[in-house]
């Protein structure tokens, strides 16, 4: 096995181990929302991006995607246009959309029922988890769609260069 393949195998194994120990599960709807906004940022041009195209590229079920896109429109992250050439565009510049904006728009529509029923949960566990949540939010409030867009473009160029074959 080549050194590159060994490194790839080790990275894959490390990723699997990391994913196994994730403390909090991020709701699919949040992941779908972030993927959709990034897909629109990457694929928008003269024509708006159609939800069917996003669903196909990202492997997101259409019924979940449409609800998520409508929520993002309602929260002014996306703009929708109707008709045969309709679709979605970013409502603002990539640099003005933060990951935290997307998450907040999706979380606002989710069930607010508290899991903290006991006094111990309310007095100890809830404040601890709220502090952790605030730390995560502050980090995500600094990440823009533009930053991720640039990373994706940079990685695409890098991968394109690595995949070149030179035949003499």
Image: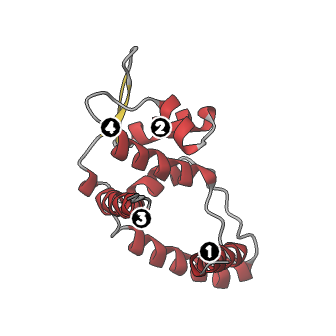
On screen, residue 11 above or below 149: below
**Left or right: 18 in relation to 168:** right
Q: Circle 4 is placed at which residue position?
A: 44
57 horizontally vs 64: left or right: left
Instruction: State the SS at label 1.
Output: helix
Work out whether 22 lies above or below 161. below
Position of residue 4 measured from the top left corner of the image (x, y, whole percent)? 56, 77
Q: Which residue is mark 2?
A: 69
The mark that comes first in sequence, 2 or 4, is: 4
CA separation in Å, label 1 and label 4: 35 Å
The residue positioned farthest toward the right in the image shown: 118
Task: Choose between 36 and 53: the one closer to the eye.
Answer: 53
Give percent across and percent down for residue 80. Answer: 37, 29
Task: Give the labeled residue for mark 3.
Answer: 162
The way the protein has been coloured in the rendering is secondary structure
Sequence-wise first label, 1 or 4: 1
């Amino acid at each position: 096995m080549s050194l590159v393949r060994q490194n790839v195998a080790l990275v894959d194994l490390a990723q699997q181990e990391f994913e196994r120990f994730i403390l909090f599960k991020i709701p699919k709807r949040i992941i779908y929302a972030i993927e959709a906004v990034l897909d629109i940022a990457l694929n928008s041009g003269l024509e708006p991006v159609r939800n069917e195209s996003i669903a196909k590229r990202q492997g997101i079920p259409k019924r979940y995607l449409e609800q998520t896109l409508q929520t993002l429109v309602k929260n002014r992250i996306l703009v929708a246009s109707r008709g045969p050439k309709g679709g979605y565009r970013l409502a603002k510049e990539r640099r003005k959309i933060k990951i935290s904006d997307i998450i907040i728009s999706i979380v606002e529509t989710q069930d607010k029922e508290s899991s903290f029923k006991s006094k111990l949960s309310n007095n100890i566990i809830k404040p601890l988890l709220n502090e952790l949540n605030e730390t995560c939010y502050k980090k995500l409030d600094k990440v823009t769609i533009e930053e991720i867009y640039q990373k994706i473009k940079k990685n695409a160029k890098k991968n394109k260069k690595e995949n070149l074959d030179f035949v003499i």
